[in-house]
Amino acid sequence: MERCEGSVKAHSGHQSTGGGSIPAPSLHYWFGETEEAQWLVEKFHYSKRWPSNVQFIVTAHLDGGLFGNKGEAVGAVVYSIPPTRWSVPVLELSRLVRADSARFQLSALVGMSVRRLRRSGDVNILVSFADWTQGHHGGIYQACGWKYNGQRDRAMDGLVIDGEFVPGRGANNRFGTRSPALLKERGIEAEPHWDEGKHLYWLAWGEGLKTAADVGLKSVPYPKPGEKTRASASASDVRQQSGDFGRVAGVAGERLDPEVQNGIAQARTWPRSKPWEATQGQLASGVAGVRYNPTLQSEARNLGGRYEVGPKFFALDTEGRKHVLHHELGHDLSDQMLRDGSAWKALDNGKLPQDLNGQTTPGEIVAEGFALLHTDRRFLESRAPDLVRIIEERARHYGFPVKASA
């Protein structure tokens, strides 16, 4: 491979179905070209959606002719922070796309991105999901030598409103919830949309190999095209495949991080400070541990005792903002419950609902339950009365604010 200024040049070929090699134009790989990558995703990717919390981008370009080595963008790979919570640094390959007219192997693009990430030293575990709903079994990841962890069970991935599919994150952004029941109370008819389960692939190197084993990632035989390999729904498999990989060996379940303790203390002032009613200007300086980040692509995120909100946060109504903040605070509680085993015990005993406002993993269900305790307790009591008792007991144990019943 030859390095070009600001890019990496590669010559690739495409194997025709009739045999022989059809020469493909030289490709030039560029890094951080967000505009071109987003255009490719929105035009050619089946989701038509740009992911949140993007961290790393590689685009493949044709020769530029008179314009040098940056011609038309014909492919992109996008890595982002996973929407599910991991206890270790992980990047998710969240979009892989190629223009319909392009003739090159996507495995080459993935390989280029992995080599650059390995050299960066910033991360040593990558994950990606092949969507069985779209008929994807992960052939590209198999060609690149990624490990296969298994296929998770079906999950509610969004809503159908007026015949249109609205992704779960998009529903949260627009309405502050993805719950069909809550939307019906507002006069919005919505039906839950379920995917067919996704195949989880992962790749690790260096210390990441040990960490992958610690968090429960495994390597099982690859699925074949058209083969449905449903994962077991046992509690142990849920821990490995759900995205809640907080149960790492050596974590003391009863110990709270000092930053989290400080965050809890700040949150106990929320009934007075009401950060969900603050303006962007007020939150720019911080209000009770909540700070505005104008570059944040999601509505909010938990930084371990500190909470950031982005522009999308202010598109929600006051109740929606309050719910989002308590959901993020709830993640500190759910992380602790995953560590001390109480979340897994509740799961094993059938005390966790399979779905709560579209959340289907133990950690997300606890975080959503904690938010509902503060914003819609009556709904939670009717939907999951056992969860109310469990969250209240654990929240009081660790000093989290608990709203008294009316």
Image (cartoon, helix red, strand yellow):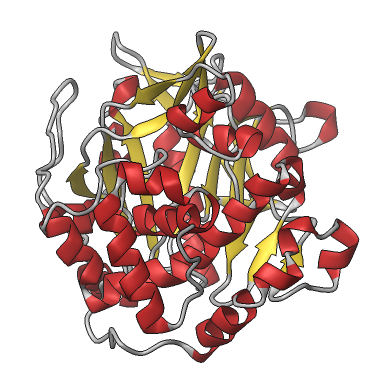
Q: Give the vertical position of 282 relative to 369 (above or below).
A: below
Residue drawn at 35 percent across, 49 percent down: 381
Q: Quadrant of residue 283?
A: bottom right
User: Residue lying furthest right in this view?
Assistant: 281
Left/right placement of residue 396 relative to residue 374 reads left
Q: Nearer the viewer, residue 176 or 198?
A: 176
Position of residue 139 measured from the top left corner of the image (x, y, whole percent): 27, 33
Q: Nearer the viewer, residue 25 or 291?
A: 291
Residue 60 seen: no
Residue drawn at 46 percent across, 33 percent down: 179
Left/right placement of residue 91 relative to residue 337 reads right
Residue 353 seen: yes
Position of residue 115 measured from the top left corner of the image (x, y, whole percent): 46, 58
Position of residue 77 measured from the top left corner of the image (x, y, whole percent): 53, 41
Residue drawn at 40 percent across, 32 percent down: 157
Left/right placement of residue 184 relative to residue 16 reads right
Q: Give the vertical position of 400 relative to 97 (above or below).
A: below
Q: Quadrant of residue 100?
A: top right
Q: Nearer the viewer, residue 5 or 303?
A: 303
Residue drawn at 68 percent across, 64 percent down: 308
Position of residue 27 measured from the top left corner of the image (x, y, whole percent): 59, 35
Q: Give the vertical position of 243 relative to 402 (above or below).
A: above
Left/right placement of residue 228 relative to residue 126 reads left
The mark total stands at 0
Q: Give the vertical position of 226 relative to 327 (above or below).
A: above
Q: Quadrant of residue 209?
A: bottom left
